[in-house]
Amino acid sequence: MTSPERTGSDGVRAARALLSLVEEHSAEDFHAAEAILGGQKELAQVLQLLRDFKRQQSPEDQEPVSFEGLREIVRKELIELARANAGVESMLSKSFKQLVGTPPKSTIEDTVEQIFLHLDKSPTHFQKMSAPADLLRRASLVAGLAHRERIESLLRRLAISALAENVISLPTLHSIAQLRLMWAPRPLPYKPHESRQHLAERLMKDVEQHAPDDIGKFAILLLSEGLRGPADRAIAETRRSDVKKAHGE
């Protein structure tokens, strides 16, 4: 391998390592590391930069996630993916055929809009929330590795934000920690004064650790849980109660 090739390869590995570091840790993590390594001035400055960058990119500094906001994000991403990749456009056309019928000659914007109108007829609000995000995830798989990683990262960030913000359907830390039962036998341990944001971030990291092959699926499930409203929570609690009664609990 020539020197330029080696340099390029080393640069790619370094870039991936840095992106992984930023993705896997929160602003609070970098702040804690800064406090521990404060005696090493240059390293502490790097950690401070990473902390500030993470806070700028962090969902808690953005508008709270809503069902309408999610739909708009998904709509925008689907159209951009379809314009950049013929495979995605073909996939959306096939989805249209399966859901609605043979599409007339129309723009990709019209196709996406018609798909959304059909998804709005889903029998439950939970399915209405999860279906658009799942469609985006499937489109990213067609678009290629770089797009898949970007969309999975986006869905994870949205899920974390939704879980942290939803104090109606997820009023306590315990209610967030309980969501771990989707993929593990016990709730996620937490500290009484831990922030909702940090607990939601740890919950997502736990998915990555224990269900790495299903990150996209669980990100969508957690996002949908975070977007639940009071009525959805009441229905879910009623169903859980009915199951317990049926088992004599």
Image: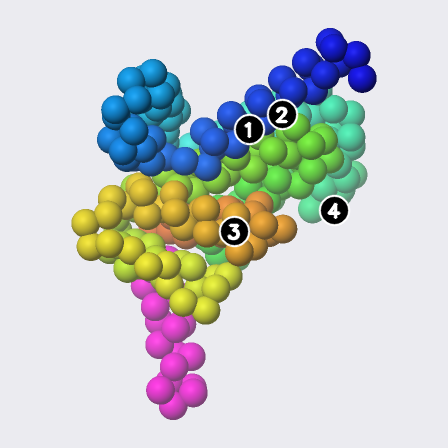
**Residue 246 position within the rendered picture, expressed as x and y whole percent measured from the top left:** 42, 86
Q: Name the mark on residue 187.
A: none
* Magenta-span inclusion, residue 246: yes
- Residue under label 2, please give it: 13
CB-based contact (under 8 Å), mark 4 and mark 2: no
Q: Check disc 4 and report its element: helix, strand or loop.
A: helix
**Quadrant of res 40:** top left
Q: Residue at x 38, y 43 (%)?
A: 201
CB-based contact (under 8 Å), mark 1 and mark 2: yes
- Residue under label 3, please give it: 209
Which contiguous range is marked in magenta?
230-249
CB-based contact (under 8 Å), mark 4 and mark 1: no
Q: Check disc 2 and report its element: helix, strand or loop.
A: helix
Which amino acid type corresponds to the residue marked 3 in the rendered image? Gln
Crowding near the residue tagged with mark 1, few <14, some 14–19, many ≥20 C-alpha atoms within 10 Å: few
Which amino acid type corresponds to the residue marked 2 in the rendered image? Arg
First in sequence: mark 3 or mark 1? Answer: 1
116 vs 245, nearest the viewer? 245
Residue 68 seen by the camera = no
Question: Residue farthest to the left?
Answer: 193
Name the image colouring. Answer: rainbow
- Residue under label 1, please give it: 17
Q: Check disc 3 and report its element: helix, strand or loop.
A: helix
* Residue 94 as seen in the image, left or right of residue 121: right
